Image: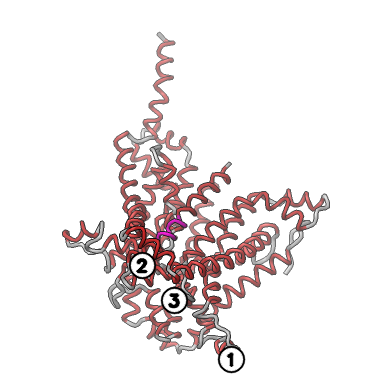
Amino acid sequence: MRHNSRTVLPGFGLSLGITCTYLSLLVLIPLATVFTKTAELSGPAFWATVTDPRVVASYRVTFGASFVAALVNTVFGLLVAWVLVRYRFPGRRLVDAMVDLPFALPTAVAGIALTTLYVPNGWVGGYLEPLGIQVSYTWIGITVALIFIGLPFVVRTVQPVLDDLEVEVEEAAASLGARRWQTFTRVVFPTVAPALLTGFAMAFARAIGEYGSVVFISGNMPMKTEIVPLLIITKLEQYDYAGATAVALVMLVVSFLLLLTINLLQWVARRRLAV
Amino acid sequence: MTTAAVFRSATAAPRAVTRATGESRVVRWLLISIALVFLALVLLLPLVLVFNQAFAKGLPAYWDAIVQPDALSAAKLTLLTAAIAVPANLLFGVAAAWCVTKFEFRGKSVLITLIDLPFAVSPVISGMIFVLLFGAQGWLGDWLFEHDIRIIFAVPGIVLATTFVTAPFVARELIPLMQEQGSEEEEAAIVLGASGWQTFFRVTLPNIKWGLLYGLILCNARAMGEFGAVSVVSGHIRGETNTLPLHVEILYNEYAFAASFAVASVLTLLALVTLALKTLVEKRMAS
């Protein structure tokens, strides 16, 4: 391969060589096994595997909980970003730094901590138990774990957009007679909407693959609280490799489609900012 | 009269503007309160609980859980894994950022997408692919068995899966940074007679050092904390293929809660140090 710009800089061959070799050996060849292993199944066998009632139930748990969690994160993520960007209060910097905790905390630690909080005799579960709400070992618990994991995605995509928002625009709206709420819904919200949607998609994409923080709190009951990643592990442990890869293939396709959507959303957002 | 009117409108104007583009005090405090209560519930409470549970059985029990041989060997494996995965991804990240930001070539956008790919893959699938490649039924399974090389359910598998999962961190931090900085300084150095390596170490590296450090911090945190991918390839052999996060899981599943949270508290401290370093580096990058 040849680069076609007239730069004097050296190192094209070396850096491209390292990059491509590394990616091929570590990422592409290993990922290719998902396709080759799944290809060992005939078409109907593949279809039967990925539409098996237990598998379909796990899609419902994973996608349902991920959707609800991403939605909760979109609402509260916007609120947190707004409060961090617009208001000054003691401890703001500390709170700002803490938002990234879910990125830094190992997922297994988050998993056991959340489970212990929400069991019926736990700090939070103790208050919910008398109300008849059980969180640990139900899909609500899965959603709680996914809210924890996904929060920084929404806050960190919305924050810079709110930061860049010029006060003049809001002043103009206000001087034209808009009430504060109208300014927010008609001026501020449309500007942050693409970022908000990107954050939602990122939180959702992370949630559907999440394993560590969920397995402890989910209870892992087949048909009820079994998530797709756990089902893949179960199939692997039973040496049903083709079955595991078939389900994994479905998840990979969904993840890639989400990745494309996110890239498209960011492209739209950039174009809107440029105009 | 007129001067007084002008004067009054001039002082009144800024106040009117702030009121029009800000919320009333009640709304402001209400929003701040809701946000803080939400964050306290979601982020702070789990954090406090980890340390509370870790010391539930007292300081001696806490210490015992941490210096127990299985815990120490798990810590050793975690450090070893990070010591291989992080430098490997540093090399990859710098090479990838250099070729993507300094040159124009066909397929560049595809390459950038591929670099990000491991982030889009579920940790469980990231572990599974190495089982498919090196496991007993895998592509290379028979050959490895004949030569008595163990990768899956052994240390190399753990290192590979961790390296896969953390591959994009450094590249992802450097690419936007180097794109923004352009190539003029490097081109000037080359024209003035510097060699490629001299240019890299004396011109590029000082410019990107904070971004590089930022990527390394995040990469290291994930490498030491990875659970899903490592769980699939590890085989959970105590004292041999157990990392710290896996050790937390084993203790928890054996109902040794205090010990489990004691080990978890070490990982939590690591996360807090990571956040602190990250915030410091962010400040450096901003200035």
Please state which amino acid type lies under the numbered disc 3.
Arg
Q: Which of B104 and A40 is in front in this view?
A: A40
Q: On the image, which quarter does residue A122 sit in?
A: bottom left
Foreground label between 3 and 2: 3
Q: Which of A172 and B25 is in front in this view?
A: B25
Q: Is residue B254 above or below residue B224?
A: below
Q: Which chain carries label 2?
A: A
Q: In this view, does A5 lie above or below B141?
A: above
* Position of residue A251 measured from the top left corner of the image (x, y, whole percent): 43, 73
Circle 2 crowding by C-alpha within 10 Å: few under 14, some 14–19, many from 20: many
Q: Which chain carries label 3?
A: B
Q: Is residue B169 left or right of residue A201?
A: right
Residue B45 in view, yes or no:
yes
Foreground label between 1 and 2: 1
Please state which amino acid type lies under the numbered disc 1.
Glu
**Numbered tag placed on residue B146 in the rendering:** 1
Circle 1 crowding by C-alpha within 10 Å: few under 14, some 14–19, many from 20: few
Foreground label between 1 and 3: 3
Residue at the disc numbered 3: B238
What span is colored magenta in the figure? B264-271
* Position of residue B140 measured from the top left corner of the image (x, y, whole percent): 57, 86
Residue at the disc numbered 2: A214
Please state which amino acid type lies under the numbered disc 2.
Val
Residue A249 in view, yes or no:
no
Circle 3 crowding by C-alpha within 10 Å: few under 14, some 14–19, many from 20: some
Which colour scheme appears in the figure? secondary structure
Residue at 38% x, 40% y is A183
- Same chain check for tags 3 and 2: no
Residue ranking furthest to the top: B1
